[in-house]
Amino acid sequence: MQSKTSLFNKEIMIQSFRNVGWVGIIYLVGLLFALPLRILMEWSNWQEMGHTYEGYQNIFTIMFPVQLVLMFAVPLLLAIFLFRFLQVKSASDFMHSLPVTRATIFNQYVSLGIWYLVIPILFTVITLLLMQGFIELEDFFTIREIFSWAGMTFVITLLVFLAGVFVGTVTGLSAVQGVLTFILLLFPAGITALVLYNLELFLFGFLPNFYLEYNILKLSPVTNVVNFVDYGRTRANDIFSLIEILIYLAIAVIFYGLGMWLYKRRSLETVSQAIVFRQLRPLFKYGVTFCTMLLGGLYFGETENSIGWAIFGYVVGSLIGYFVAEMLLQKTWRVFTHVKGLLIYSVVMVFVGLLINFDITGYQQRVPELDEIERVYFADSSFGYMEEENTTDYYMVDEPMDEHKPFFKKPETINAIQELHHKIIEHQDMLEDPARSDQSVFIAYELKNGGKVVRQYQLSDVKPFEDDLKQIYDSKEFKEAEYEVLHVVPDEIDQITISPSGPVDKRAVIADPKEITDALEALREDIKNDTYSLSDKYDENLSEITILLDDERRLRIHMKFKPSYTEFESVLKDQGKLEESRISAKDIDYAVIVKREDIDDGIRNGPPHRIMESMLKNENALKVTSEEQIQRVWESSTYRNPRDEYLVGLQFKNQKFYEVEVRSFNSEDLPDFVKQHFK
C-alpha cells in the first residue's frame, strides 16, 4: 500500500487528545474560575451593598497568582507531555516508524499545543465579552482590556510552550526538560543578577541594584510579567510595549526553528540522556559549574562579609556544580576522577578574577572631569534616584509635596562632591569594613554625552571626610534640594506637629495661621544657618516635625527637630509649646551610665531592656536621679554611636521596664560629674 503523508494526521490528533487533552481542559477551567466566575462573584457582592466596584484596574490583577501559575505551568506541561515520545524509547521507536516525516510530526504536535492554548483563551474572551454585554462591568474592565489581556497571555504562553519544545529536543529526560525550561526562561535575568552581585564583592563603589532596577525585570518573561502586574495596580493602562511583544514573538520563532532543526538531527538512541547532543554537553557542564560557583561565592561572601569566604564559596560551588553536571551527563556517581575539565575551568576563572581585582578598566578610580558633567545627584541612598515616579495609591499615608531631588549643577558644589569622591578612593583600604558602616554615600554623575557614572560607598569611618561632607551639606544648593519646607508657603500648611521620639505620650500642635507663619519663618532661618555635624547622624531620638499640607490627600513633610534650631525653639517657647515638643528630664525617672567595654558584645547588640538589665547589675555603673543631671545626660548623649566609649540607659516615667532607651557618650561630651565618677 502506498504511504500517504499530510500536515495533520488524524490518528496522531486523537492519540494526543487522549494523552494531553486534560491539560487544555484544566487550563480552560482555571481561566474561567480565575476571571469570569471571580468577577461575577465580586460584582454580585457589590451590587448587594449598592456600591460601585473600583478594586481592579486591569484584568491581570484579578486572581493574579492563579493566572501566573496557569500562564507558565500549563504551556510547560503541554510541551513535556506532547513530546513525551522523545524521552521514552518504545514511544520514540513507534512514532518514528510511522509513514510521516519528522517535520510533519514536529509541526503537528506544535500546532496541537498551540490550539490547546488558544481555545481556552478564546472561550474566556467570549465569556467576558458576553458578561460585558449583559452586565455593567466597566469598573472591572473594558473591551480593549479584554483583548489586551488575551493577546499578552497568548504571547507569554506561546513563548513558554516553544521554549519547552526546544528544550525537549535537547534532553532525553522529562524532569530535566521541565527544570531546564524554567532555567532557560529565567537565565538572562538570573545570570545578570548573579554576575552583578558578585562584582559588588570586588569592585569598590559598584552598585548592582542600580543596573538591576531598570533592566533585569525585562530580561525574563517571568519577572517581566510579575513586574507588570505589580505596577498595574496603580497604572491601569500600563501594558507591555509593542517592542517587547515583538521581541517575545521573535524569540518564540527562534525556539521553534531551533527545535525543528535539532529534532531532525536527533539520534533515536539518545533517549534517557540528560543532554542528547554531545556538542552541547560542555556548554551544559560549564554553565552549571559557573552558576553554582557564583551562587556559592555570593552566599558565603554576603553572609560572612569577607572576600576570603567568597573565594571559599567559589571553590565549593565550582566543585559541586562540576561534579553534579558530570553525574547527570555520565549517569553515574563515579565521576570524581574526571578533573581535567575542572582544572582548565579553574585556571580560566582565576585569570578572570585577577583581571577584575586589578581593575584593568579603571572603574574604581573613575571620577569624571568637571567639563564632562551635566549635573550630579548626591545623597545617602540611591532610592530617590532610582525611583521612577511616586506612587499615589489610596493606601499611601505620606506623599511628598514636590520632588526636589538633590541634583546639583553649580561648579562649586560639584567640585566639593568630586573632592569627597577622590578622598574616598584614596582611603579605600580603611573603609572596607562591611560589618560596620557609619554612613552611606551615593553619587550619580550625569554626563553631557548622555552617559552616567554611578557609585555607592559604605563609609565605616566618617571622621576623615567630615570637612568634605560639611562643604556639601552646608551649601545653599544642597539645603534647597534636601529640605522641602523651604519651598512651602504658610497658606499651604494645615498644621505643624512636633512629636518627641521616645516612650512619652505628648506632642505639640500648631494650627493657628499666625503661629504657623512664625514657626515656618523660624524653621527656615534655622535651616539656612545650620551647619553639618557628625553627631547629627546619631541623633535618632530627636523630636520629629510633621508639616501637614493637605489632610485629604495626606501630603506631609517630615524632618528632625535638631538642637541647633534655636529660632524654632524660641518660637515654640513663646507659644507655650516647647515642653510638649520634646523629651526633658521631667519625662525620665533615672539614667544609668557604664563603660561600653563593661557590657558583653552579645548583650550590647541585643534589645534595649536587656542592655539596661546588664547595666544595672554592673558594679561600676553610675545611676543618675537628679533632674538637673538627667537633663545634661539627655542633651549630651546621642543614639548609640558604635564608637562611643560610654552607654547610657534611660528609664522613662510611667513606662514599663522594657520601654527604655539606650544612648551613648564619647569621652569629649561627658558631663563633668560623669568624668569624675569614672576617673
Image: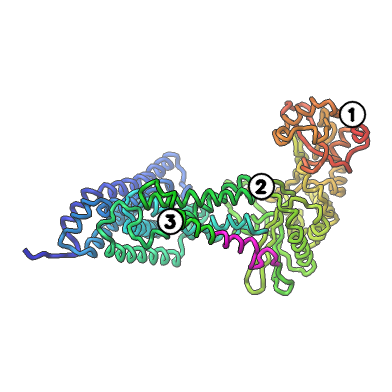
Circle 2 sits in a helix, a strand or a loop, which is it? loop
The residue drawn where x is 36% and y is 58% is: 163
User: What is the quadrant of the C terminus in the image?
Assistant: top right
Provide the residue designation for mark 2: 551
Provide the residue designation for mark 3: 285
Q: Earlier in the sequence, mark 2 or mark 1?
A: 2
In magenta stretch: residue 353: yes
Q: Is residue 526 above or below residue 592?
A: below
Report the disc number at residue 371.
none
User: What span is in magenta?
Assistant: 348-366
The residue drawn where x is 46% and y is 44% is: 51
> Relative to residue 532, is residue 429 drawn left or right?
left
| Foreground of the two, 7 or 327 | 327
In magenta stretch: residue 228: no
Which quadrant would residue 645 be assigned to in this image? top right
User: What is the quadrant of the N terminus in the image?
Assistant: bottom left
Mark 3 to mark 2 CA distance (whole Å) = 61 Å
Circle 3 sits in a helix, a strand or a loop, which is it? helix
> Relative to residue 234, is residue 331 drawn left or right?
left
Type of amino acid at the residue the image marks with label 1: Ser
Residue 266 seen from this side: yes
Q: Is residue 19 above or below residue 660?
A: below
Type of amino acid at the residue the image marks with label 2: Asp
Provide the residue designation for mark 1: 626
Q: Nearer the viewer, mark 2 or mark 1?
A: 1
> Relative to residue 253, is residue 532 drawn left or right?
right
Circle 1 sits in a helix, a strand or a loop, which is it? loop
Which residue is at the far left?
1
